[in-house]
């Protein structure tokens, strides 16, 4: 794992979590909660999605590896934020 790829995944995860929170107001955790869930989801999703799609570039800094980090981190962050929001809402009932 390269550090630049991980940082890209974390940042894009935070962005993805906040975008999902803005789009789905019922599951939103607030800005800080969306960011934290997005960061965690970005790290997990970025690594998992890149490996599942065979897009892991092995530490290279080319457009394909950057794109896979951006997409994986953003999607992972959004998905984890939505899952946590749904669980939190279900527990509140």
Image (spheres, rainbow, N blue to C red):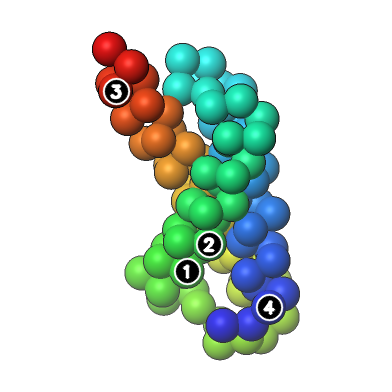
In 3D space, how far apart are the residues under numbered discs 1 and 3 (Cα atoms)? 29 Å
Front one among 33 and 66: 33
Q: For mark 1, does the 10 Å Cα neighbourhood hold few (<14), some (14 to 19), or many (20 or more) residues?
A: many
Q: Which mark is residue 3?
A: 4
Dot placed on the residue nearer the N-terminal end, 4 or 2: 4
Label located before the other in sequence (1 or 3): 1
Along the polypeptide, which appears first: circle 1 or circle 4?
4
Q: Does 64 appear above or below 61? A: above
Which residue lies under the disc numbered 1?
47
- Mark 1 → mark 2, Cα distance in angstroms: 6 Å
Q: Does the CB distance between marks 1 and 2 fall below 8 Å? A: yes
Identified at 50% across, 78% down, the residue is 56
Task: Name the mark nearer the viewer: 4 or 3.
Answer: 3
For disc 2, the marked residue is 43
Does residue 8 appear to the left or right of 13 in the view shown? right
Report x, y in % for residue 36: 59, 45
Of residues 86 and 56, the one nearer the viewer is 86
Q: Position of residue 35 (x, y in %)?
A: 63, 41
Cα separation, mark 1 vs mark 4, equals: 12 Å
Residue 67 sits in quarter: bottom right
Q: Secondary structure at mark 4?
A: helix
Left or right, 88 with respect to 70, comes to left
Q: Residue at x 68, y 78 (%)?
A: 3
* Residue 15 or residue 90, whichever sits in front: 90
């Amino acid at each position: 794992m390269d550090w630049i790829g991980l940082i890209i995944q974390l940042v894009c995860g935070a962005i993805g979590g906040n975008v999902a929170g803005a789009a789905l107001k019922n599951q939103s955790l607030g800005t800080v909660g969306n960011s934290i869930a997005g960061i965690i989801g970005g790290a997990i999703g970025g690594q998992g999605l890149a490996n599942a799609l065979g897009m892991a570039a092995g530490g290279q800094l080319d457009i394909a590896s950057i794109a896979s980090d951006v997409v994986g981190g953003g999607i992972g962050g959004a998905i984890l934020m939505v899952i946590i929001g749904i669980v939190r809402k279900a527990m509140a009932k």
